[in-house]
Image (spheres, grey):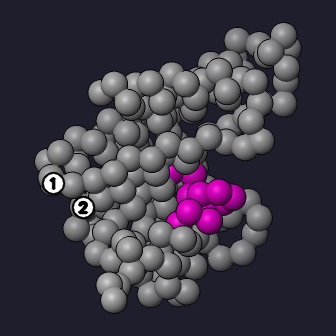
């Protein structure tokens, strides 16, 4: 019988401090992956132990937290580079995202720009930096997630990322 599915692998998870990202980090750690939690805040929104500390304690893997605003390209690159501490990036989970409560007709330009910067630019360049490292290392997998519940604005930004990831 083989060991854990991700034993010896390192995953970078944007938005990994809370919600879906925290669950993804726990699931990957349970399968043996070392974890880089890349998020704008270390503490989970739902309270409790920070995700990187939780996975170290609960799953006996290596983990770290990197402050990362996915709209800042230097932050994204630093998050991907943080995986080098554990042997390099194998999995990139572009989980960070937002949804808007406003309807399509009520969304102003600033809200639209913020949504596109996080949901498209952050995912696109996070995937790009990760892919560069993965090509360099000869291994890797990319994953993009969609914030839920899905609002009309998020739905509008998600196909752009799916198409670009598939075509590049």
- Residue ID at (27%, 42%): 131
CA neighbours of label 2 inside 10 A, class few (<14), some (14 to 19), many (20+): many
Q: Quick check: 106 above or below 139?
A: above
Image: 12 above or below 99: below
Residue at the extreme front of the image, as rendered: 1
Residue 149 belongs to the span the image colors magenta: no
Q: Residue at x 38, y 74 (%)?
A: 5
Q: Give the mark count.
A: 2
Left or right side of 74 for 41: right
Q: Is residue 33 left or right of residue 107?
A: left
Q: Quadrant of the N terminus?
A: bottom left
Q: Where is residue 86? Give x, y as percent.
A: 28, 70
Looking at the rendering, in which quadrant would you find the C terminus?
top left
Marks 1 and 2 close (CB-CB < 8 Å): yes
* Foreground of the two, 161 or 64: 161
Does label 1 or label 2 sit earlier along the sequence?
2
Residue 17, given in percent of the width and then of the height, sits at 60, 61
**Quick one: label 1, few (<14), some, or many (20+) residues within 10 Å?**
few
Whether the magenta-drawn stretch holds residue 22 is answered as yes
- What residue sits right under mark 1 in the picture? 137
The Cα atoms of the two marked residues, 1 and 2, are separated by 8 Å
Where disc 2 sits, the SS reads: loop
Q: Which residues are magenta?
A: 14-25
Q: Which mark is residue 88?
A: 2
In the picture, measured across the screen, residue 84 lies left or right of residue 111, that is left
Instruction: Using the image, determine if residue 148 lies above or below residue 7.
Output: above
Indicate the position of residue 15 as horizontal and vertical percent values.
57, 52
The residue at the point 39 percent across, 51 percent down is: 92
Residue in view at x 58 percent, y 28 percent: 158
């Amino acid at each position: 019988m083989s060991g854990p599915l991700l034993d010896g692998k390192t995953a970078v998870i944007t938005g990994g401090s809370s919600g879906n990202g925290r669950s993804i980090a726990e699931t990957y750690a349970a399968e043996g992956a070392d974890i880089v939690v890349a998020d704008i805040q270390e503490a989970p929104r739902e309270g409790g132990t920070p995700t990187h500390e939780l996975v170290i304690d609960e799953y006996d893997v290596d983990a770290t937290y990197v402050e990362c605003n996915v709209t800042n390209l230097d932050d994204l690159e630093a998050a991907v580079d943080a995986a080098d501490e554990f042997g390099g990036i194998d999995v990139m989970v572009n989980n960070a995202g937002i949804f808007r409560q406003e309807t399509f007709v009520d969304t102003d330009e600033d809200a639209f720009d913020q949504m596109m910067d996080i949901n498209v630019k952050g995912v696109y360049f996070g995937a790009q930096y990760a892919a560069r490292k993965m090509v360099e290392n000869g291994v890797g997998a990319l994953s993009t997630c969609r914030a839920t519940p899905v609002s009309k604005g998020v739905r509008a930004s998600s196909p752009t990322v799916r198409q670009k990831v598939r075509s590049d």
